[in-house]
Amino acid sequence: MKTAPLSLHIPEPKTRPGDLVDFSDIQIPAAGIVARPASDIDAAAMRDYAYALIRVLDDKGQAVGEWNPKLSADTLRLGLRHMVLTREFDERMMKLQRQGKTSFYIKCTGEEAIGVAQAMALDDKDMLFPSYRQQGLLVARGCPLVRLMNQIFSNTQDNLKGRQLPIMYSEPDYGFFSISGNLGTQYPQAVGWAMASAYSGDTRIAAGWVGDGSTAEGDFHYALTFASVYRAPVVLNVVNNQWAISTFQGMAGGEQATFAARAVGYGLPALRVDGNDFLAVYAATEWAAERARNNHGATLIELYTYRAAPHSSSDDPAAYRPAEEAKNWPLGEPIERLKKHLIAIGEWSEERHAALVTEMTERVMEQLKEASSHGTLGNPPPNDPGSMFEDVLKEVPGRLLIQREEMLALRAAAAQEGV
Amino acid sequence: MKTAPLSLHIPEPKTRPGDLVDFSDIQIPAAGIVARPASDIDAAAMRDYAYALIRVLDDKGQAVGEWNPKLSADTLRLGLRHMVLTREFDERMMKLQRQGKTSFYIKCTGEEAIGVAQAMALDDKDMLFPSYRQQGLLVARGCPLVRLMNQIFSNTQDNLKGRQLPIMYSEPDYGFFSISGNLGTQYPQAVGWAMASAYSGDTRIAAGWVGDGSTAEGDFHYALTFASVYRAPVVLNVVNNQWAISTFQGMAGGEQATFAARAVGYGLPALRVDGNDFLAVYAATEWAAERARNNHGATLIELYTYRAAPHSSSDDPAAYRPAEEAKNWPLGEPIERLKKHLIAIGEWSEERHAALVTEMTERVMEQLKEASSHGTLGNPPPNDPGSMFEDVLKEVPGRLLIQREEMLALRAAAAQEGV
Amino acid sequence: MARMNMIQAINSAMDIAMERDPNVLVFGEDVGYFGGVFRATAGLQKKYGKRRCFDAPISEGGIVGAAVGMGVYGLRPVVEIQFSDYIYPAFDQLVSEAARLRYRSAGGFTAPLTVRTPVGGGIFGGQTHSQSPEAIFTHVCGLTSIMPSNPYDAKGLLLSAIEDDDPVIFFEPKRIYNGPFDGHHDRPLTPWTKHDLGEVPEEYYKIELGKAKIVRPGEKVTVICYGTMVHVCLAAAEESGIDAEVIDLRSLLPLDLDCLVTSVKKTGRCVIVHEATKTCGYGAELVSLIQEHCFYHLEAPIERVTGWDTPYPHAYEWDYFPGPYRVSRAIKKVMEE
Amino acid sequence: MARMNMIQAINSAMDIAMERDPNVLVFGEDVGYFGGVFRATAGLQKKYGKRRCFDAPISEGGIVGAAVGMGVYGLRPVVEIQFSDYIYPAFDQLVSEAARLRYRSAGGFTAPLTVRTPVGGGIFGGQTHSQSPEAIFTHVCGLTSIMPSNPYDAKGLLLSAIEDDDPVIFFEPKRIYNGPFDGHHDRPLTPWTKHDLGEVPEEYYKIELGKAKIVRPGEKVTVICYGTMVHVCLAAAEESGIDAEVIDLRSLLPLDLDCLVTSVKKTGRCVIVHEATKTCGYGAELVSLIQEHCFYHLEAPIERVTGWDTPYPHAYEWDYFPGPYRVSRAIKKVMEE
Ligand SMILES: Cc1ncc(C[n+]2csc(CCOP(=O)(O)OP(=O)(O)O)c2C)c(N)n1
Ligand SMILES: Cc1ncc(C[n+]2csc(CCOP(=O)(O)OP(=O)(O)O)c2C)c(N)n1
Ligand SMILES: [Mg+2]
Ligand SMILES: [Mg+2]
């Protein structure tokens, strides 16, 4: 028997701050080469898709191959509009966070195609169980930005009564589930919701999102297990944006296999998609939704992208990765690519684009004006502290009534004493 | 969009009590057809192994194909001996449980090849993290049965001081980790131990076991994730014995994919093995151990077998599956198959086998005599209740000293009052 | 009226809930065809089909996670965790999700699920089939925690739990599934059929969550307990010869504090009994509340009689289990001060 | 001696432990190259290599499960759970495994791991970055639970925790990482550099686990607290004008009961303060023990000042946080009775 000592392997990204950007080992297959099977295909026949990369937009901005969803120019322009709005919104909110108007913010820069195209490819009544980086879903579903801003500001009009960290939206009317701070928990919930829909003979399906890093949680495994066993009508998305705060995707297993490949062991079909390609994202989502809606069960979609933003307003990525990575991401960025496509097919121009950006900036500012009129974090201080005792249970229980009284008495006394 | 209602899929085994046994959809490939790659092969080249079935013993009892571990007749006879002993031990202990000599028992009938061949294929110093159905590991490592019996009886010589449910052995001197009642928890621990061994430049590897049903726990996912990420020197075994108490393996995802296939998504190699074939189990374990010991990381082995025993002494399988299944299991049973092989190669005979069985029965009875002399459960009543306060922490903390005093005073008072 | 043991009463509650409301479904490990390792769901799959009563993967986190999602959809899932010792893998989904969903969504989403799970020892189950983890749930706001002590209450409380619009953990003391075990393990068990509270209406009825019951009125000392310990305390009160008032909490959260305070103000003495380990057990909260509300009425320190602060040891379970002798001594002790 | 804030002191403890013992290793989410989201492990990977300080998958259950296995091998893993709000996925591995391994194997196997995790609110973190879950761990026998209130203690206690042969949960009150926050959120924070207990020896020293510290001697009322609340209570004592004795527990389990009992027997009055929710919080156990041991010395009911029984609300966190005004009123209240 061999007796050479063992050693521990610790994965490490190829480059760190100070190194030159190096994406040379990222394989980018050409657009259009992946075949599109019927959406009722046997999962066992789909195993190779876990290692492919579905791309529709080629380098010249043309839509090619079987996965081209053949969307109308109007639809494409709508998608572009939503993406631009999402980005403008993100930029503005992050600035406001920097100015102290709120405590926290998370941008989805570079990942806009995901939320936007997926919301558009799904039915409006389908139920979404997002992580915190799919604000594009809400934008595409037409949720007024002022609602989101009110939540971000914890102001008087905040539909979550000042309870939640900024961006932890909950929008029942837009089929958008309450975002949890605990990573991954929404994934089996999405499956449970889908099971309930199937149980009820409904036609609505569910969709869930987690990040590459979050796939390591038990909830990811629960979701795939239950989705497979009960053939739940759900689209399970892994947004592989290469980073989990400071930790590269190799630390979640991405060195050894794609995240799409996780599906294989559960007998689920996987699609691996260029996440910065609006058309590819749309097409893959449409395929998975069709499969689910026809009772053929769940699909795992890996959305291959890059987190161009810092993890959150609390994060400075310059501490752990080369600053130039985002710009050099081999799959580009989604707005630019869709814009190029629309121009290539003669349905858009630089001028119209500039006008769109201006329009969206103005839209953000206008909504911001309204939101600000209801206050920003702590300004004025929120004025219904008693509400913190509501919604723990349907009825405020006795002990919380007492605690509420105590708290209000305390405030009153403090005010009187001038403390 | 299609609007036919969705419906929920609930997996169901093909047959239930009253039905005729029907294993017609179990595909049994011929023995010897699977190629044996070098143990340092790239996992990506191994994906098909997750769907194959490594078999060495053919229907005539011949050892065929590349996976034949070419063991000496002595080694084979030793394996047979361990398996027979394991079975006789199980039979006797279950009888004693029925007689009220202990509270609980679990047999591994039909699965003896797994513990025995795997212990023999591993190095004696490798660390084992078993579930509760691998008593064969201890038998093969030479742990005296009397030790196990003492534990089962919670008697005065019980190395676990009467604390643990019967069969929840813990045998540090035999490299056998404390069995947990909570399913699956040992799996990431095995990986952690293996990581520690690699961290320390050791040459020992770890092995862990879970059942088909237990793969649905989060711990299974943690283990595969960590094993993949840190390339831990560990052999991860899934004993697919078709049942988890009353629940068939389809409810853990076995309808949609093999359990071996779970490895694929983590970039780990998988071997799927005829678990009732001593030679195949030995060979696969040897391969995985070699791979781990040479620092190529973990392997997932699915041991395909059938739980011929009831789940435990508390269970009656006639309530949920056709009684005749075990006898008709298409892969036969391990003792019979190894015996046939040894006879076929002229190294064994029915007479020698009968003698072996007698010898092993006597061995069990002899050890039982010794164990019984130290008592059976409650007879005599265990006599060191104060010991229950030990080992909560290394030193008995103050509050437990007080509780111990209180308890002893209580006993004394009760005795005096004759309660 | 029928004679039912606790399992039958619990089964009857689920049966009726499923009958009345098509949104009620039941799932968990081994609960489908087999009817559960304690047989609590026996017959439900046969009656309602496997769509409404089915097995689950061995994945407590997945079971509760899926149930949360179903609750969000609008169903009322009733899930079984086979032993409460195995509820920990579901802890995050219960605490971070089920318990806080209504709050964090300001009522936009809710998770009206019921988790049934057997608790307690005295069945030679060793450390992983004997635990009583109620106190880690009663610390979590947003959860309701119930523990019945007899078939009649079990059925009425379980029906209330299932109809409750928030998540409820329904702890079932498995030692009394068959009869009102009083801790005298060396004596034969009286079956529920011979007990008044084994008389259970076959039809629908509910018992309000949050109401304790005085199961033995008395003047001298208040004994507070729940689950199996109710029968132990009744025996202990009898054996002590002291005029003890025994209160069965039935509901841990919400707690019927008024009932306790009234009693202790009357008796001036209090013993609290549970099977769970002592430190930070539910008894600690009870002591705190009683000393807060009855401080000037207390004549002696409140005594806690509980499981020791160790795991549940297989061979020594009768030294671990807080039996009637220990309780009666505690009753006498508080009388002496 | 050096001036250190709490993060630096914690970092120094790990540094020294790694230096002294090659079996000590550190891992967790973002702790490697980056040095942790609170920077507690900054520099350790650089100094000791990535073999000894490395990132982990986002899998708290896996982190603790692997650490248990490492402990069994003979290492002393120190793992970070990024926020204690995220410790629940590891609950089963902590409670069923780490805490009970020594017991169930009768000492054959042990899990000497240390789990470091930031607790507490007041940082606008909302309900999932503010929790104080200590009471669900103190109910579990086999676990040791520590919470320091200053850099000096943090370093000495963490070194003891790492060298302890059983699993230790080391709760770090994140609100005082930078300075002794006293609850006056509208006033500037004094940094640790300006505080005596920010004087921390650079070398090795230990503080025994299980010893409380009287941080303000007094005669009239005993205030028991830990973590951030120590500073709040000191401010409150000052502001109340009452001669209060303030005790910093430092170690929740083991508990320095003698210290508390001696103090309460002297003062006859007691206020218990923690940030966690009230019901079944750690304060309940303290009340129980004190009423048990000091019953005849108590002149007034013991008061608990705690977080309300709700999740931690983002915008209302200063109404939630038990600040000095609330504590001082409680001190005055117990003096009145
Ligand atoms: C259970 C849990 N553990 C840890 C965290 C802290 N945390 C918040 S975001 C994050 C990284 C997530 O990375 P990924 O899943 O890749 O999503 P991304 O941020 O890239 O969108 C971590 C570790 C958490 N919120 N919940
Ligand atoms: C966490 C947990 N959940 C549930 C149980 C109850 N339980 C004990 S054995 C068992 C079935 C396990 O089946 P499998 O993993 O296939 O192993 P096998 O018994 O077939 O060897 C169950 C559900 C448990 N012990 N632990
Ligand atoms: Mg990511
Ligand atoms: Mg099995």
Image (cartoon, coloured by chain):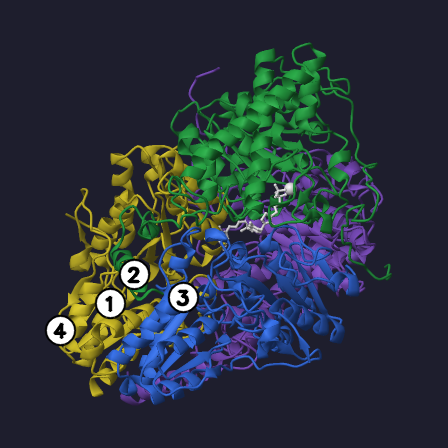
Chain colours: A purple, B green, C blue, D yellow
What residue is shown with label 3? C323
The numbered mark at residue C315 is none
Q: Secondary structure at mark 4?
A: loop
Answer whether labels 1 and 2 touch (C-beta < 8 Å): yes
* Horizontal arrangement in the rendering, residue B395 relative to residue B257 (left or right): left
Label 3: state its secondary structure.
loop
- Contact, mark 4 vs mark 1 (Cβ under 8 Å): no
Instruction: Name the residue rendered at 32%, 72% in the picture.
Output: C330
State the residue at coordinates (56%, 68%).
Answer: C179
Q: For numbered disc 2, what is the local secondary structure?
A: helix
Of the residues shown, which amino acid type is indicated by label 4?
Answer: Gly
Which mark, by number, is residue D176?
2
Which is more N-terminal, label 1 or label 4?
4
Tell me the quarter of the picture where residue A139 sits.
Answer: bottom right
Mark 4 is surrounded, within 10 Å at the Cα level, by few (under 14), some (14 to 19) or many (20 or more) other residues, namely some
Q: Nearer the viewer, mark 4 or mark 1?
A: 4
Residue under label 4: D218
Residue at mark 4 shares a chain with residue at mark 1: yes
